[in-house]
Amino acid sequence: MVAETIPGPGVVNVPLNAALEIRFSEPVKPGPSGEAVFISPFEGANAVVKWKGSRLRIQFRKPLTPNRTYVVTLGSSIRDTRNNRMDSSFTLAFSTGPALDRGEIKGRVFASGDAGMDVWAYRMDAARDGGTEPDPAVLTPDYIVQAAADGAFRFRHVAPARYRLFAVRDRAGDRLYQPGEDEIGVASRDVEPDSDGALRADSCFFRPARREQGVPALQAVTAPDRNHLSVRFDRWLTAAAPIPENGVVIAASADSSDRLAVRNAYLNRENPRELFVVTADQEEKKPYWFFLRTDWTAIHPDTSCWKAPFNGSGRPDTTRPKLMKSSPAFREHAFNPLAPVRLTFDEAMDTVRFSSGFSLSDTSGRPVEGLFRWVDPAEALFAPSAAFAGPADYELRLTGPGAGDVCGNALADTLIPFRTSTVDTLSEIAGTVRLSRPGPAGVFIVTAVQAAAPDVRYTVRATGDGVFRIRECLPGPYLLDGFLDRDGNGAWSAGAPFPFEPSEPFVVYRDTVQVRSRWPNEGNDLVVP
């Protein structure tokens, strides 16, 4: 633990040439300084950190800034010689002026493995780079704080100003965002002082993700067999709309009308840098040109069409398709009797013949009638004509050759027994969702995910006055969140760090929602910051 600091906590009028010293109660074995010591406003190379026994000394190559509050935070990664970590982080605030700044910014980072996430704050009223907005890839932040293990963070003693915040997993420890390497979360708005001039920002939420700058570029087109193409890009593709029917063209040359028929095209769910295309029979080693329209993607490149040459394959496809995921799962014991059946495969299936290899019946052998809808050639939804009985036992069977891929390879015979819950056990979750302050227009979307079974999820749109009601959901504990769908695409938009595009405002409900059978859980009010 920290035993003493020079200067002491809260000391004002500290000389501009002062050095800092922190004394621990016992000798310490620190990790890298970039992971253990945080100085805000950020001093970068101006700060020289030296460790010796039970003392930490920080010297500055250039004088400190007059009339500024500084905050030094020691991360909990500091360990003693017996390898015991500090119980918690430590903060020392002092000022080179007559008073300490009192600004505060609080929030939380929602990410897998929250430990190691930093939150960076850039002061927007400072002149920088000719007045341009801060780019975290080239500009170090003014303030830095490390999020706790649960994602919570808190800036203290911040000067009143307008700030732009990012949550970053700074893998290199250089206080610069590395596109494609670091995850980054973009705020839904800048933080500003209240009307009375005080900075008291709360509920600043982030959902970091790894992203890459620029637009996707086509890298290669290969033919693993005579009926398939693998189209690879240098980064993820995001679909803003379905690939149009004429979105893919394959021709014998760059300007030829001699074309190879395209059966379908869809993104690889496991790797969105890859597009799968199913074709008519190619000719062995014949040169072809591949063309793909770009207008269905979320990020448009400079060209309206990607194109690349490839050589055809004469090799037949002899690999069986695989069932990657099913809902209901094998031996699921409480399947929602009002839910559709969802089947996900590793490749395009024969959507015309598939129903002949699909059977669903109760244990007496009575078939369940219904209709198929294909989300894409590798994912099918089956909606029963009438709700499943419940509680009741059912068997889902997939048998060849009907349940096969587009090349006639049959799926291995598959049996999925499951049991439905009774409709009487279903319940509902209701409440309201609204913005904490006047903001952009849009429709609120609310999602409930069962805490113990993340595949059980329900999503609804709130009414115009913000009321939402999730009907006919299974009992159990649920995690609830919502966001404002500003662009109307039905999915949460993460924004962009530079050029800056704010993320869509979102909120995560503070409590777990306990849903009991036949007992609606109401009054769940979400306030989106």
Image (cartoon, rainbow, N blue to C red):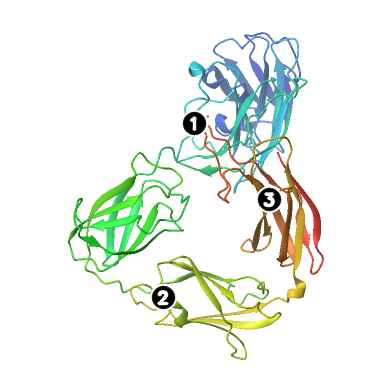
Residue 459 position (above or below residue 399): above
Q: Is residue 384 left or right of residue 154?
A: left
Callout 3 secondary element: strand
Coordinates of residue 391 in the picture (x, y in percent): 71, 80
Tell me how far mark 3 sits from mark 2, CA to CA. 38 Å
Callout 2 secondary element: loop
What's under tag 2, amino acid-wise?
Val
Q: Which one is in front, 98 or 503?
A: 503
What's under tag 1, amino acid-wise?
Pro
Quarter of the image where one finds residue 276: bottom left
Q: Is residue 323 left or right of residue 13?
A: left
Residue under circle 2?
Answer: 352
What's under tag 3, amino acid-wise?
Asp
Quarter of the image where one finds residue 449: bottom right
Coordinates of residue 352 in the picture (x, y in percent): 41, 75
Tell me how far mark 1 sits from mark 2, CA to CA. 46 Å
Q: Which one is in front, 303 or 15?
A: 303
Q: Which mark is residue 481?
A: 3
User: Which circle, 3 or 2, is nearer the viewer?
Assistant: 2
